[in-house]
Structure formats: structure tokens, C-alpha cells
Image (cartoon, grey):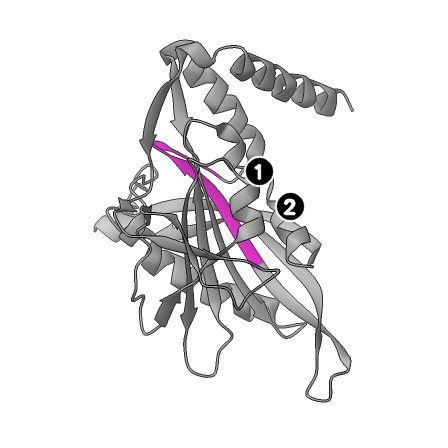
Amino acid sequence: MIASIVSLAIIGGVAAFLATHNQRQHLGQPGVQVAAKAIFGFDEAAPTNAPFVVSTNSIALPEKVLDYRSQPEMIGQLTVNTLPKDTTFGRRVYFRTNEPPIICQVVLMGSDRTSIHKPQYCLKGMGLQTISTELMKVPIERPHRYDLPIMRLKVRGEGRDADGNPQPIGGVFVYWFVADGALTARHGDRMWWMARDMMLKGVLQRWAYVICFTPCVVGTEEAAFERLQEFIGASVPEFQLTAGPPLAISRAAAD
């Protein structure tokens, strides 16, 4: 209980500090690659309307990862209208034969920190419920070997079978946050580090929120996560500029 109260006090103090110190802000560099490539949006209420340009810049998610083919996905107008105008997006869907797709999305904040929100809001919008949450690590080999901290959520939703009857569906939702020189899967860490850099350096870290999600048959979540691990390990070096500290090579491996 005491720890929870302290944590809430810290986060509240962070929010108050940031709200009253905008004049000191110097916007930091992003921890992901941004490309001069337009990303488009669509109107969920009128999907037959022509797509519109959300931004002339987007996150440079790779077109090819392993043997996956991919295509860009548009951003819903509700999301575009909800988030600040200086938010930068990236979103692609990756396909491989006889496997469910993998959706990769990046939301990069600008000078308005409200671009980044708690992941539970995304899940609610997708009609999914969280079954379990676990802090984990995914090994990354480039530009050096390091462990990427991620939060893994097993989720449940409701779909339809071939006859149109309700059918439960499973899924694995993975996320993390990255800024220039900073990586974490904890929302509280991100808030604290943002306040620290504002106080000590006058720099507002430019955080990105990265999501990888795949649906799956209920009961096959571990196999789905193995696929996500493989995908993340191959894709992250292609668009993420920040890497974690190098892992020490064991003496046995060195010999």
C-alpha cells in the first residue's frame, strides 16, 4: 500500500512538473527512425471515403522482415483526432503463409507528451481483455547483443466462427517504450525519466510507444509469443536507433 501511494505521488509530481515547465523544454531526439514518407488515415464512420494524409513523415518500419511480406496500414480518424497534431505514426501488418498476421505500430510523441498513453487504452479500443501481464526480455543481436525489455500481455477477445457463431479468440500483445538513449517497458519508468531529464537537462525526451500484436487460437499463446520474439529480434534493428547495454560474453563462450 505504501509503495503504491509513493508511486502515485511521484507520477503526480511528474505530471505537475511537466505542466508548469513547458518554457524550459528542449525537445530530445527520437529513438526510432523517421522517414519522409506519408502515412494515411481513414474515417471509421465512412470507410468508403477517400483516405487522407495524416502526416508527410512516418516511422520507417521495414517492408521486409525475415520471410514475412507486409503492407502499410492506415490510422483511424478517431485516433488521429484524439492524439496531438505533432504525433508521428508508423503501422504495418506482416504476413506469413499459414500463420496469423503480426501488427506492428509505433506512436512517437512530439512536444506534447500526451501522445503516449497507457497500453490498456489500446486494448480497450481493440475489444480485448488482459488475461496476464509479464515483464520479459527479447534478445537482440544488432548493433550488438542486448536484451530488449518488453511487457507481454496475453489477451482475450470474441470473434466469429465460419457459421457466424461467437467464438473466443486469443492473442499476444507486446509493448515497450524507447527514447534517445533510453529503453523501458514500464510506464512509471518512462514518466520518471522524463521528469529527471527535464529537471537536470531541460530536455523533454521524445518517447515512442512500440506495439507488436498477433491473434491466436486460445491455448496457443506461447507458440504465438515465440513467433513474436523471432519477429521482434529481426525487425527492431531495422527501425530502432536506441540499443540496450551490450551483454557480457561469458568466459566459456569466449574460450
Q: Which residue is drawn at 57% across and 38% down?
A: 117
**182 in magenta:** yes
Which image quarter holds the N terminus?
A: top right
**Above or below — where is 66 with respect to 125?**
below
Question: How many angstroms separate mark 2 from mark 1 (CA)?
Answer: 7 Å
Picture coordinates of residue 125, whole percent (x, y) = 65, 53
Q: Name the residue under label 2.
A: 121
* Residue 89 horizontal side relative to residue 114, left or right: left
Amino acid on which the number 2 mark rests in the picture = Tyr
Q: How many labels does the image show?
A: 2
Q: Residue at x 32, y 39 (%)?
A: 242
| Residue numbers of the magenta segment | 173-184
Q: What element carries label 2?
A: helix
**41 in magenta:** no
Q: Badges 2 and 1: C-beta atoms under 8 Å apart?
A: yes
Picture coordinates of residue 83, whole percent (x, y) = 53, 39
Residue furthest left in the image: 255
Q: Nearer the viewer, residue 157 or 186?
A: 157
Q: Mark 1 points at which residue?
A: 117
Is residue 175 visible to the viewer in this orientation of the structure? yes
**Above or below — where is 84 with respect to 240?**
above
Picture coordinates of residue 48, whole percent (x, y) = 53, 69
Amino acid on which the number 1 mark rests in the picture = His
Q: Which of 144 and 44 is in front in this view?
A: 44
Give the numbered dot on residue 146.
none
Is residue 151 visible to the viewer in this orientation of the structure? no
Task: Give the quadrant of residue 188.
Answer: top right
How busy is the neighbourhood of tag 2: few (under 14 within 10 Å), some, or many (20 plus)?
few
